[in-house]
Amino acid sequence: MTAVNIMVFLHGTAIMHAAAAGQPRAERVRQSRRGGPSVRDFASYLPAEAAVRKVAAWQCGGAQICYLSSHRAAQDVALDQDVLARHGFPAGQVYYRQPGESYADVVRRARAGLLIEDDCESIGGVAQTTRASLAAGPGPAVRCIVVPEFGGLAHLPDDPAQLWRPTLES
């Protein structure tokens, strides 16, 4: 199998606000909707369940890893890079939207073959996902796996080749 460029969305998918630690997923979503101080303190973000281990497994399985930030400013993306490094995420470029770009534009610019993102429950649901934009726009097909927001990545297979199974949401 040729190495696949897997892009992992950060906020709500791979990392989460510090107050979410030890809370059930529903409470994490409520916290995000309320937008408390922890939600806005991006430097204190933590990995979602099994995120570091799972992304490392995909890299060990031959995947090239990159990340997608919700931020638009380089100084905020630097906070994301610090969080990733501090918590031992595999190295990979962190992409973000430039002026006039959508998330789908960034996924295409990064030439991602697979996007792992969350269902955007705290901001309006699946209509807000990058998958919805990718499906509606031009460009090469990108496989998308949508996971529950703040639910972690533990339920996904370790083998990146298995991420292409039709039983996984796409």
Image (cartoon, rainbow, N blue to C red):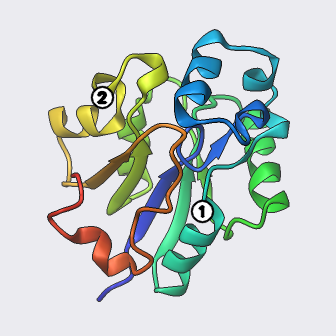
Label 1 Cα neighbours within 10 Å, binned few <14 / some 14-19 / many ≥20: some
Left or right: where 54 falls relative to 138: right
Q: Residue 124 carries which label?
A: none
Asked if the residue under mark 1 is in contact with the one under mark 2, i.e. CB atoms within 8 Å, the reply is no
Q: Distance between the residues labelled 2 and 1?
A: 23 Å
Kindly state the secondary structure of the residue where label 2 is placed: helix
Left or right: where 67 falls relative to 169: right
Q: Residue at 82%, 27% (x, y): give it.
A: 41
Q: Residue at 50%, 62% (x, y): give it.
A: 154
Label 2 Cα neighbours within 10 Å, binned few <14 / some 14-19 / many ≥20: some
147 up-or-down from 63: above or below: above
37 up-or-down from 84: above or below: above
Residue 106 is at least partly visible in this image: yes
Quarter of the image where one finds residue 102: top left
Q: Residue 50 carries which label?
A: 1
Q: Where is residue 106 in the image (x, y as percent from the top left)?
A: 44, 43
For disc 2, the marked residue is 126
Q: Nearer the viewer, mark 2 or mark 1?
A: 1
Q: Position of residue 44 (x, y in %)?
A: 84, 38
What's the residue type where badge 2 is placed?
Val
- Closest to the observer: 90 or 34? 34
Left or right: where 91 falls relative to 168: right
Label 2 vs 1, first from the N-terminus: 1
